[in-house]
Amino acid sequence: MSADAPLSPPPSRLPNVGTTIFTVMSALAAEKNAVNLGQGFPDFDCDPKIVDAVTRAMRGGLNQYPPMAGVPSLRQAIAAKIGRLYGRAYDADSEITVTAGATQALLTAILCAVHPGDEVIVLEPCYDSYLPAIELAGGKPVPVMLDAPHFRIPFDRLAAAITPRTRMILINTPHNPTGTIWREDDMRQLAALLAGTDILLLSDEVYEHMVYDGQAHQSVARHPELARRSFVVSSFGKTYHVTGWKVGYVAAPAALMAEFRKVHQFNVFTVNTPVQHGLADYMADPAPYLELPAFYQAKRDYFRAGLADTRFKLLPSDGTYFQCVDYSAISDMSEADFAMWLTREIGVAAIPVSAFYSQPRESGVVRFCFAKREETLALALERLRKL
Ligand SMILES: Cc1ncc(COP(=O)(O)O)c(C=O)c1O
């Protein structure tokens, strides 16, 4: 072996992580020139006003380190929004922290609370960062399965999964990938289940402003028994069509937040200054997030009406910008094979829901993202009608 040969790496901290289906599908979509309804982000631009607000901050010299927990005006705007929408008063100084996207908020919340050997209950299918984050903390993920086609919360299974080692339950509403939402009664049942325990909740609410048909987003912040034990996570990327900016936040009671910040300060320390100032300015007008449900509902309705002319069976989409479909009338391929076939042969990329489970599981369901321009959706529908 030569003297400068690189060392072989240590045993992997994440031995089960490889190339994800998202990377595979995006590469295939690009190669086949397919309409990419796989990727979960918009193909349209953000409001120029938010770019102006960030530009003003940069030109105004706001380019050095901000406070560790985030720019005060942004934390105040976040606390005011949560208070107005969900009725809980978080203290901007001690209970709100700005993060590098929701992904960092989730990892940091898990790292600060989960000790080696602790159990963390995860409802599957789930967003792909949850399980690796728990494993990095030395925690033990305890999966509880949601079943197609309705993916409702199985409270009996959830209750059965709780043990004396349960440190935390991770929930996500509106839910990626299924588009389901927690209802008020679900939150009440969860509160009843957790009352009298010291189990923490990590509530991923990045799609909080994408709830349809006049329904209300059930933030855990609305429910005192839940809020007192919760880290609530959201993302400006989803709300303001700026997923590439990677700015989010977490709200939690002060004692939990103090632990969160101990990890946050040595994880990223803080988040870029001008974007925080720009977001604080832009948040002064609540219209962009208050109008978001109508904006996305129009896209959802357009896409669903088009899909009604295909052989797909539509699953409910009460929230998020995802629409799941059952393809069992079209094919008996596995979800991954069907998604690849659809991309290659029909020219529309989708994501298999099986990619969101830790164990092999087939429901005959794939996920489309409708956060796209109408012409993108129209082209996809034209192709899907040929099936
Ligand atoms: C459920 C869920 N949580 C978290 C994230 C990550 O958000 P961010 O880009 O702000 O890290 C996503 C992004 O797709 C998501 O779907």
Image: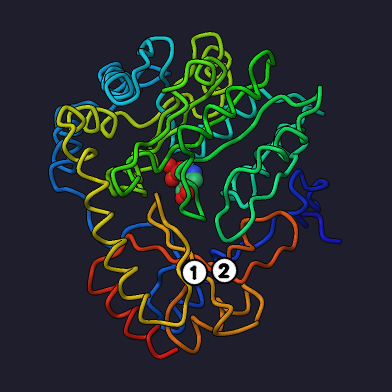
Q: Quadrant of the rendered structure where residue 347 is?
A: bottom left
Secondary structure category for the residue under label 2:
strand
List the single residue furthest toward the front.
185
Going from N to C along the chain, the mark reached first, 1 or 2, is 1
Quadrant of the snapshot with the C terminus: bottom left
Secondary structure category for the residue under label 1:
strand
Q: Nearer the viewer, residue 83 or 152?
A: 152
The numbered mark at residue 137 is none
Q: The disc labelled 1 sits on which kind of residue?
A: Val
Query: Is disc 1 in contact with disc 2, using a CB cutoff of under 8 Å?
Result: yes
User: Residue 68: percent from the left, percent from the top?
Assistant: 42, 18
Q: Residue at x 31, y 20 (%)?
A: 71
In the drawing, does residue 352 fall left or right of residue 221?
Answer: right
Q: Quick one: label 1, few (<14), some, or many (20+) residues within 10 Å? A: many
In the drawing, does residue 235 fall left or right of residue 158?
Answer: left
Q: Residue at x 27, y 19 (%)?
A: 80
Q: Quick one: label 2, few (<14), some, or many (20+) residues within 10 Å? A: many
Quadrant of the snapshot with the N terminus: bottom right
According to the picture, the residue beneath numbered tag 1 turns out to be: 325
